[in-house]
Image: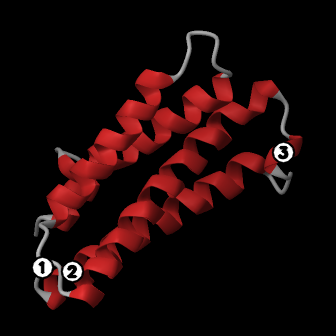
Amino acid sequence: MPALEAESITSVVARHEAAALAQLSDAVEGVSLCRLDAGTSGSAKHWEGRAAALAQVRRDLRAAARTGEHEAWQDVVARRLHEWRTQEHDLTPSAAPAWLAYTAGGIAALSDLLVGSPAHSEVTR
């Protein structure tokens, strides 16, 4: 992956990660994640999942740039998306709503990077 491309994509992903973390902060209103009740944790867990998935991609892109690995950014995101979808598939029907929201958030963030979203438009410019 060319260094300039990797850096600009990494910057876009980092901005989206920061936005997800800001949404998470707003959702928890200063309360620790472990202290949220089931009624309010869904939104927070969604944003936490988005931030976690984007952090994984950001780290993968930075590692690839450091090592000179030639993997397209779309492949990095698609690989992580596959992992998140597998995690979602492996959840039992009785999985806690917080886990479902967390996983859905991660899948949404990665899907947004790949297809027809403001994030996708920003990375493909």
Q: Which color scheme is applied?
A: secondary structure
Q: Is residue 24 left or right of residue 29?
A: left
Residue 96 is situated, as x and y percent measured from the top left of the image, at 68, 22
Residue 6 placement: quadrant: bottom left
| Badge 2 element | helix
Residue type for callout 1:
Met
2 and 1 marks in contact (CB < 8 Å): yes
Identify whether 92 is placed above or below 117. Answer: above
Residue lying farthest to the top in this orientation: 93
Which of these two is toward me, 9 or 99? 99
Q: CA distance from mark 1 to mark 3?
A: 39 Å
Residue 101 is situated, as x and y percent measured from the top left of the image, at 57, 31
Which of these two is toward me, 107 or 30? 107
Residue 48 is situated, as x and y percent measured from the top left of the image, at 60, 49
Residue 36 placement: quadrant: top right
Residue 6 is tagged as: 2
Q: Which residue is mark 3?
A: 34
| Badge 3 element | helix
3 and 2 marks in contact (CB < 8 Å): no
Which of these two is toward me, 118 or 91? 91
Labels 1 and 3: the sequence-earlier one:
1
Residue type for callout 2:
Ala
Residue type for callout 3:
Cys
Q: Which residue is mark 1?
A: 1
The residue drawn where x is 24% and y is 60% is 76
